[in-house]
Amino acid sequence: MTNTVNWFEIPATDFARAKKFYAAVLETEITDMPMDNMQYGVFPFDNTNPGAGGAIMQMEGVKPSQDGTTVYLNGGEDLTGALNRVEPAGGKIIMPKTSIGENGFMAQFIDTEGNKVALHSMN
């Protein structure tokens, strides 16, 4: 096993709003992947190389939360850019860019759905 995490799902109550938020913050395209009884949007990923992929999902019984596991998304070369797009896209920064020493930088925010999510970069 090269990575412990291989997939994540971010719950949404308003799929279109969540998709728009993450597309704006990460400056990326979220690909719709229709499934029975749920809306599902996949973040870009390369399943031929080690790493994790993930998606936004809306379905009955799934509820966004600020409690529990925190997903760290790739903030790019320098997470400042992505972090600067959080509040204009409708989110709220709860931890500004913070040094974690030789492991780079992190920040946390609440997305438009009420999930606590983090960003990471080396710069």
Image (cartoon, rainbow, N blue to C red):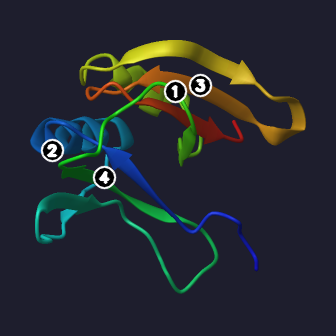
- Locate residue 6, reporting x and y percent: 57, 69
* Category of crowding for the residue at label 4, using alpha-carbon neighbours closer than 10 angstroms: few (below 14), some (14–19), many (at least 20): few
Q: CA gap, disc 3 to disc 2?
A: 24 Å
Q: Which residue is mark 1?
A: 67
Q: Quadrant of the N terminus?
A: bottom right
Query: What's the residue type where badge 4 is placed?
Result: Thr
Query: Element at badge 4?
Result: loop
The residue to which callout 2 is attached is 15
* Amino acid at the residue labelled 3: Ala
Residue 60 left/right relative to 5: left
Q: Which residue is mark 4?
A: 28
Mark 2 or mark 3, which is nearer the start of the sequence? Answer: 2
Q: Residue at x 59, y 81 (%)?
A: 49
Point out residue 53 in the picture as x, y percentages from the top left corner: 47, 65
| Pointer 2 or 4: first along the chain | 2
Nearer the N terminus, badge 1 or badge 2? Answer: 2
Mark 1–mark 2 distance (CA, rounded to whole Å): 20 Å
Q: Nearer the viewer, mark 2 or mark 4?
A: 2
Circle 1: residue type: Asp
Quarter of image, res 101: top right
Q: Determine the residue positioned at 70% across, 20% down.
A: 98
Say which of marks 3 and 2 sits in front: 2
Please name which of the two marks, 3 or 1, marks the residue nearer to the observer: 1
